[in-house]
């Protein structure tokens, strides 16, 4: 099967491979890009992932989890109390028919989800489980549940403090709520923090929203057609993204937006099929998840290693506390900003608690991770950094192998899904990055074009570099956004509390009612 | 009580014929009011890019403006010129559902629409807006061919 597909998919690669010398040169470019990139981003990555003194626990992971816990407690477990109400809002039960034609709650949620559901759910989970073992899943779910409160906080503020322009368009996001919210509260430094957030948002857009996507899309394609230089995938991707964001070829973006949700459903469907077929192993898999969560089952770093991996990959996948979703959600039409907060809290639930957990279960059940039968613990690879896998796979290749063990042809579907997910995430993040860019440099054709061209160049770099440096930089850039965003949310959360109390009281008294449709 | 006839406009020839028929019907009734509605097909459950969302409010205003100037206002003016008490309205939504809901809300006693103006695969599966309206309307519906 693989040889056949090489024939039809690998024509470009085959041309490149025709001469061994050309191939060597091509690989040489990748290696150079990789080395330069790793050197350049090293210090930034080390700062963000610096461990607490005397431990191996990165402070940034604690930062995210503590924030999510504080928001959960401060808003009285809003993610559970208003869960049913959130569903009703998405269904449109509370939407005024006179507002029909504006961006609906569902549309804002779907748009935000298509920016987050993607490689984080497929490749990210494989990285988490591959390094942290099944136990990482437990911490991932916990982080997802807590993260719902972070998302609620930031998206409410995103709508409340967005800019509405005279021509009817809107712009929102942390940079707007930080500067406006701080000045409303009479606090200094709002503008500087907003600028700092925007800088990190641009880096995040180029990292996690771009390079990581390009990198893993290349890994997936080359896994099927055979190894070929990454910059080729990069240039093809860059050309298509360029056509959409610079050339304004909406049809490509429109097609992707329509196909991606179906890919998501197909992915979850395939995972369900594998789980149903192996239903007798689900109990065992959850046993592994719970045992691993507290003992580590032999993974590097023990249960702390599992915890770090779970929290990290959950944050990377659902972006709660990062601030990106606040940009996506701010376009909704509502008189009550808090309703968008309620809707957005479903995002980490769908993204992390449901989809990521399913990926993790498929990987565990497929037994791609090698267990030492004598001890019942997982065996480490030669370097001792991750769990040994059946074919030595990691990242998206590991997920692919796990699905293939249940449905042999699924890697082909997954390859298409990965490419589409990568593409839609890139389009979403090019928008988030652009919003931050225009906040810094002003709106205007030239300024926007500069950012878009830089964005496309980074696609090529991302596809050419190897996974290690790319994933480190992507994580670091996205978490840097969370540093500024969460710091500011602590000051702004009382504004959300006022909204919540007022809304809850009016909902209780019957002042806010469902519309009959 | 005065009767109120709702006309579903769609900007096509069949919509025009529906208008003419409603006019004829109204002229036979004393003090009959006419309500001309144009529904822009729209669903809250579609998938959009962030950029589309950002532009949505502006686009909606443009769509309503266009529907008013091209279709609804000329129709209402023609009716008023002919001596009828007439009103116009533009809304977004599912055509059949919205027409029915507005009719009920404004106390319309019947709806006049043109027959399905488009054909194709989707219509075969889901039925046209006209079919849906006939099946689910709360008041009598007249379909003009």
Image: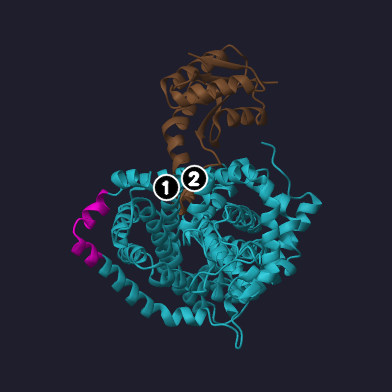
Chain colours: A cyan, B brown
Q: Which residue is drawn at the image coordinates 29% and 73% (left, top)? A: A32
Closest to the observer, A180 or B36: A180
Say if mark 1 contacts mark 2, CB within 8 Å: yes
Res. A135 image quadrant: bottom right
- Dots 1 and 2 on the same chain: yes
- Inspect this view and state whether residue A67 appears: no
Label 1, on which residue?
A416
Which chain letter matches label 1?
A
What kind of element bears circle 2? helix
Was residue A192 drawn as part of the magenta stretch in this picture?
Answer: no
Q: Going from the N terminus, do you reach mark 1 or mark 2 first?
A: 2
Q: Give the position of the N terminus of chain A as an image quadrant.
A: top left
Q: Which residues are magenta?
A: A11-26
Which chain letter matches label 2?
A
Relative to residue B39, is residue B112 depicted above or below?
A: above
Say whether residue A174 is left or right of residue A216. Answer: right
Residue A18 drawn at (x, y percent): 20, 55
State the residue lying farthest toward the front. A374
Was residue A13 drawn as part of the magenta stretch in this picture?
Answer: yes
Label 2, on which residue?
A263
- Inspect this view and state whether residue A372 appears: yes
Residue A436 drawn at (x, y percent): 44, 68
């Amino acid at each position: 099967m693989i040889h056949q597909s090489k024939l039809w998919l690998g024509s470009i690669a085959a041309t490149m491979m025709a001469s061994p010398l050309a191939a060597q040169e091509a690989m040489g470019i990748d290696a150079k890009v990789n080395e330069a990139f790793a050197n350049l981003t090293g210090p930034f990555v080390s700062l963000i992932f610096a461990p607490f003194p005397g431990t191996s626990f990165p402070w940034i992971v604690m930062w995210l989890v503590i924030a999510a816990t504080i928001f959960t407690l401060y808003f009285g477990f809003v993610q559970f109390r208003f869960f049913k109400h959130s569903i009703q809002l998405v269904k449109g039960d509370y939407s005024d028919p006179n507002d029909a034609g504006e961006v609906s709650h569902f549309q804002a949620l779907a748009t935000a989800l298509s920016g987050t559901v993607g490689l984080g759910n497929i490749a990210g989970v494989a990285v988490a489980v591959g390094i942290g073992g099944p136990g990482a899943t437990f911490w991932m779910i916990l982080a997802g549940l807590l993260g719902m409160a972070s998302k609620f906080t930031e998206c409410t503020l995103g709508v409340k403090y967005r800019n509405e322009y005279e021509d009817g368009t809107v712009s929102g996001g942390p940079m707007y709520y930080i500067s406006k919210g701080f000045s409303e509260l009479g606090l200094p430094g709002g503008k500087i923090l907003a600028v700092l957030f925007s800088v990190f948002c641009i880096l995040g857009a180029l990292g996690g929203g771009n390079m990581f996507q390009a990198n893993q899309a290349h890994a997936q394609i080359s896994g099927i057609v055979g190894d070929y230089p990454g910059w080729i995938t990069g240039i093809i991707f860059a050309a298509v993204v360029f056509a959409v964001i610079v050339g304004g070829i909406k049809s490509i973006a429109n097609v992707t937006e329509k196909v991606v949700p179906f890919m998501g459903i197909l992915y979850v469907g395939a995972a369900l099929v594998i789980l149903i077929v192996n239903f007798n192993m689900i109990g065992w898999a959850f046993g592994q998840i719970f045992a691993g969560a507290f003992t580590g089952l032999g993974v590097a770093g023990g249960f702390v290693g599992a915890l770090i991996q779970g929290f990290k990959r959950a944050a990377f996948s659902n972006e709660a506390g990062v601030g990106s979703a606040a940009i996506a959600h701010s376009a909704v039409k509502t008189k009550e900003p808090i309703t968008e907060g309620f809707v957005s809290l479903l995002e980490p639930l769908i993204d992390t608690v449901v989809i990521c957990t399913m990926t993790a279960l498929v990987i565990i059940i497929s037994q791609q991770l090698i267990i030492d039968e004598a001890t019942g613990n997982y065996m480490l690879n030669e370097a001792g950094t991750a769990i040994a896998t059946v074919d030595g796979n990691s990242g998206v290749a590991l997920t692919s192998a796990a699905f293939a063990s249940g449905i042999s042809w699924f890697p082909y579907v997954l390859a298409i899904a990965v490419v589409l997910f990568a593409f839609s995430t890139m389009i979403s993040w090019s928008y988030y990055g652009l919003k931050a860019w225009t906040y810094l440099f002003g709106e205007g054709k030239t300024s926007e074009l500069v950012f878009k061209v830089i964005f496309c160049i980074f696609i090529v770099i991302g596809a050419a570099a190897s996974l290690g440096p790319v994933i480190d930089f992507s994580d670091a850039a996205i978490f840097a956004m969370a540093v500024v965003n969460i710091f500011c949310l602590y000051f702004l959360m009382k504004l959300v509390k006022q909204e919540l109390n007022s809304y809850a009281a009016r909902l209780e008294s019957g002042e806010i009612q469902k519309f009959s449709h | 009580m005065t009767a109120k006839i709702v006309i579903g406009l769609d900007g096509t020839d069949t919509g025009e014929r529906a208008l003419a028929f409603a006019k004829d019907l109204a002229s036979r009734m004393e003090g009959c009011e006419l309500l001309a509605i144009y529904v822009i097909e729209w669903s809250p459950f579609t998938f959009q890019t962030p950029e589309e969302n950002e532009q949505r409010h502006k686009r909606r205003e443009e769509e309503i403006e266009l529907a008013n100037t091209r279709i609804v206002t000329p129709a209402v003016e023609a009716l008023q010129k002919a001596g009828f008490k007439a009103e116009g309205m533009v809304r977004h939504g599912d055509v059949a559902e919205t027409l029915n809901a507005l009719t009920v809300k404004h106390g319309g006693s019947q709806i006049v629409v043109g027959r399905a103006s488009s054909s194709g695969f989707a219509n075969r599966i889901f039925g046209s807006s006209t079919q849906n309206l006939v099946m689910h309307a709360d008041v009598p519906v007249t379909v003009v061919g």
